[in-house]
Each structure stands twice: as C-alpha cells, then as structure tokens.
Amino acid sequence: MNDRNRQGRTTLAPEPARLEHRLFAHSRLDVIPVGLAAAHLAAVLALFVSFERLSWAGFAVLGLLYAISISWSINSIAHNFIHNPYFVSPILNRSFSLMLSLTIGFSQAMYHYVHLWHHAGNSDRPAPDGTTIDYLSIYRHGRNGRAESPWGYVFLSYFRDDLSEILSKIASRRPDDARFGKVELACVAVFYVALLVIDWRALICLVPFYYLGHCLSSLNGYYEHFGADPDRPIAWGVSSYGRFYNWTWMNNGYHAEHHYRPKQHWTQMPALHKEIAAAQQAAGVRVIRRAHALGFLDPSLPAR
C-alpha cells in the first residue's frame, strides 16, 4: 500500500519539580495512565486467579468489566502513549509497551503503526483501486463509497488484521520496531499459554469477553468517525464533550480536535477545543451527546 499524502545554584539533590525531565517526557500527570495501566494488568491477573471462587453470575459481571476495560485501555492509555510516549527513557517506553501488550492481548508496537496509518488516512474513502491508507477506515469495507455497516465493522474488524503484512510494512522503514513487534507477539503468546496451562477453564471462559472487548473498541472507533468529513482536516473526527466520559477516558471525546492536532497532549485537549471552536462550528464538525461507544443512541445520528 502506497503512502499519500533550561540559573540557579547547583544542589546535590535534583528539584522535584523537574521530575518530568528525568522520568516523564511530557507531563508528570502521565503518572495517571501509567499507574492505571499497571492496575489494569493486576486486575486481569486477579480475575484469572479468582475464577474458582466466583459464581457464574459474579464471573459474568467481572468479565463484562474486563471487556470494557480492554476498550478503555486501547482508547485512552494505549492511544495517548502512541502519540506522546510517557517516558524519557526508550527502555521504559519499550517495557511499558510490552506491559500493555500482555494486558490487552496484542502487540502495542504493531498497534502504534496501524494507528499512525489511521492518522495518515483519517478514515479515508477508498481510492479507485479500492484501497485506503487507513487500515481502520470505516469506508474500507463499505460499498459505493459509503461507510460499512456498524455490525460488520464491530464484529469483523478483529479478524481482518494481516499480521505479516503489517510487520512487513513496518520492517521496510523501521526494522527495529518490527523486530520488537515480533518480540511482543511472542511474549503475548507465551504469557497466555502459561495462563492456559495454569487454569485452562479460566482462560477459555475469558476468551468471549476478550473478543467482546475488542468489538467494543471497534464500536468506539466507528462512532469516532461516522458522520465526520474525511475530506476536511478540521472535521476528520466526531467529538463528544461529556465530562464523565472525558474524565474517565482521558479526553478521548475530543476526537475531532485530536485528528486536527494529533500530538496535542491529552491534558490539553479542552484548551485546544476552545482555541478552534469557532472554526469547528463554521466547518460543521459533528458533535454527539453520548460517549462514542454509545454513538448509535445519539438522536442526531445521520443515515448511513
């Protein structure tokens, strides 16, 4: 697929206010997603080891929360990490990437590039040869230039990734990243095989919820772009400004703003919205009242 388009006196101890320059690359507030990511992995392992002591009803409730947590992590913690890696140290960033991979169940290094291609295409419509730059475009598998049905996009997207094609494309530009992607895939495989050996029943019972989590992530992605204008940069995404949604999902609701300026730090998205609000309104940027994953309930839903 072709591409388109730092005087003060010297002291023995460092100042605490400089912590972000020694550990965090962009903001000390990134301790929030980092801490939540560690808690997420711990929660997944806790659910697994608690399987024998849970009733089926209790397991079903926790399994549903597990599924939601997958979509939440992909679209908040992992997503922000792609655009603004949390740490100064490359080793720490690699380690964090691996931890995310084990928690979510797929290579974060590979997701990094798939997501960058998403921003290269911005949910573009197919070219005359039927291809899109954006692997995740809602138009990629649609017909007659229209968006695909949400049913197909939500339930089939998980099975559409061609790992060898993705790795090959990464290797053509960043062979080190491709190799690390393979390492992550191998570690994920070993991790879950180990869980399978420890308690195969627990892992098998988690599989449907794991799949559901990825479906929920696709549902989120669909309504981040359904009704947007792939031909106008300021309107490339659909936004949702609910306070609870953005507080819990690290400002993922500011999606039109994010596509307009992808490197904006997650803590600065409300400020960016205020900066460009007039231009957005003039361009007719689509805004929904619900969180993206509930976009199908929005009263202003356009016809597909």
Image (tube, helix red, strand yellow):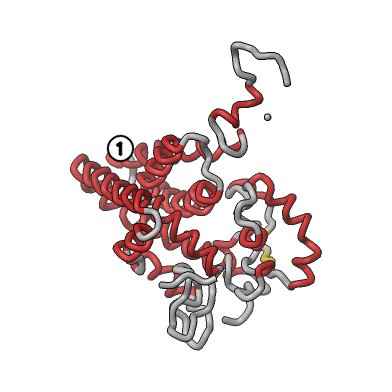
Quadrant of the drawing holding the N terminus: bottom left
Residue 295, image x, y percentages:
59, 67
- The front one of 190 and 298 is 190
Query: Residue 149 at what x, y percent from top left?
Result: 48, 78
- Kindly identify the residue that appears in the image at 44 percent across and 61 percent down: 114
Residue furthest top as drawn:
12
Helix, strand or loop at label 1? It is helix
Q: Name the residue at 40% across, 36% down.
A: 42
Place of residue 133 in the rendered image (x, y in percent of width and height, measured from the top left)? 48, 71
Question: For the point 31% across and 55% down, which residue is it?
Answer: 207
The single residue placed furthest to the bottom in the displayed view is 144
Q: Is residue 153 above or below residue 94?
A: below
Q: Is residue 37 visible?
A: yes
Q: Is residue 225 above or below residue 61?
A: below
Q: Position of residue 157 (x, y in %)?
A: 40, 68
Answer left or right for 196 relative to 76.
left
**Residue 106 visible in the snapshot:** no
Left or right relative to 281: residue 142: left
Q: Is residue 148 left or right of residue 190?
A: right
Amino acid of disc 1: Val
- Answer above or below: position of 38 versus 216: above
Q: Which residue is mark 1?
A: 49
| Left or right of 228, for residue 48 | left
